[in-house]
Image (cartoon, rainbow, N blue to C red):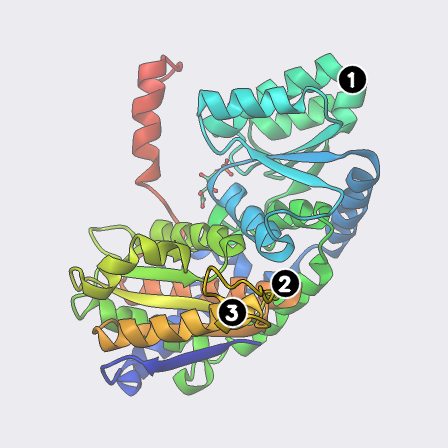
Amino acid sequence: MIKLDLSHIKENIPFESYQEKVSQINEMIVNRTGLGNDFLGWVEHPKNYDKEEFKRIIAAAKEIRDNYDVLVVAGIGGSYLGARSAIEALRGLYSQDKMEIIFLGNTLSPTYINQVLAYLENKNFAINVISKSGTTTETSVAFRLLKELLIRKVGKEKASKAIYATTDKAKGALKKEADAEGYQTFVIPDDIGGRYSVITAVGLLPIACAGLDITSLMKGCYDAMNDFSSPKIEENLAYQYAICRDYFYNHNKQVEMFVTYEPQYTQLGEWLKQLFGESEGKDKKGLLPDSVTFTTDLHSLGQFIQEGSPVLFETIIKVDSPLLDVTIPEDKENLDGLNFLSGNTLSYVNEQAFKGTLKAHFDGGVNNIVISCSKLDEYNLGYLFYFFMKTCSMSAYLLKINPFNQPGVEIYKKNMFHLLGKPGY
Ligand code: PA5
């Protein structure tokens, strides 16, 4: 499924010295006794998920694919990043699939929202509004605008049929509205927080609407749940990776740079930044997660990584076979001097870029962790999602941090609401 290559780390990581701590934290995760233990539902979710709802998700996705050309997903943070990263990673950025997926509710940008609404004027679209709290401003504003457009285009009754709400099972403004208007609803379990929710209806409905196999994705999660359940460090790749992160953090590294080699994985970097940043960045602690897409960013941040302040290590998510490939043609004139590459595939060229960069950065003193899989399909992505979530919980607990809250996010909201004159602020 995945390989963890630690051979491009200069130091000897003292794994054995972590065993006692890791065993204790593993117990805390299993018995739900650690900080934020109300939010450990994701740990066994691949086994315990609601099978009836899963069937409804598949049926709703079919209904959406059969009846609409575009699905607009309205959500922000954990209520959108997982779905977006999966859809882009698995379909590529210019997919030929019949269903177009657009993301809104993830910004307050007037220009972006204006342009998306204008684009949707002549489209036959459905909406999946996703919000656990049901009150997030970005999502609520986008949803109000989308609803207004949809009702104007097709009338209230058809609009209500085209709206699918993923939210809390009982509370929040969105749940109230969904019940009143008769939208089909899907549940975000109480014990799963936003950034761990890609394996719930939050991620699964949009992913299924994109024509992707969510049964396989959940099977990948299930196998990862079993593979990363052992407290023994030598048997658990997620815990080995968490220990490396902790070791680097305690040895003067401030930044973990996630690296991918195709633009369709850029959003996976965004998902990882949210997962680790929001889980660990508290109490003045935590690695700053950043991400780059190579080779594109070798022509921007590559210089800093190679020779800049020695604040970072890299974690490369390496996919051996691409979704699609291209062969470089022969050109008799050879004016561009590229005939030395004729007949080679771009995946071969990209692979040499990966190998050359890994050596350059390692020789330059940068530690590199390589997490690889043979190809990125639904199964392997589900497996990877779970791997990173398990790593993240272990990492945060090693720092004595609650991995499941985000108190800092509330502060900007309070200020903004005060400035906007929201009642009670
Ligand atoms: O990880 C989290 O909990 C957050 O990123 C939330 O997902 C995000 O703030 C959106 O919240 P909600 O789903 O309540 O609209």
Point out the image quarter for the N terminus: bottom right
Point out the image quarter for the C terminus: top left
Instruction: Name the residue: 50% across, 26% down.
Output: 112
Place residue 289 in its image quadrant: bottom left
Q: Which residue is mark 2?
A: 323
Discs 2/1, front: 2
Place residue 373 in its image quadrant: bottom right
Q: Which residue is mark 1?
A: 154
Image mark for residue 339: 3
Amino acid type, callout 3: Asn
Q: Viewed as shown, does residue 98 lie left or right of 175?
A: right
Instruction: Name the residue: 24% across, 59% down.
Output: 303
Separation of marks 3 and 2 at Cα, in angstroms: 25 Å
Instruction: Name the residue: 55% across, 66% down.
Output: 346
Instruction: Name the residue: 58% across, 51% down.
Output: 88
Q: Are marks 2 and 1 in contact (CB under 8 Å)?
A: no
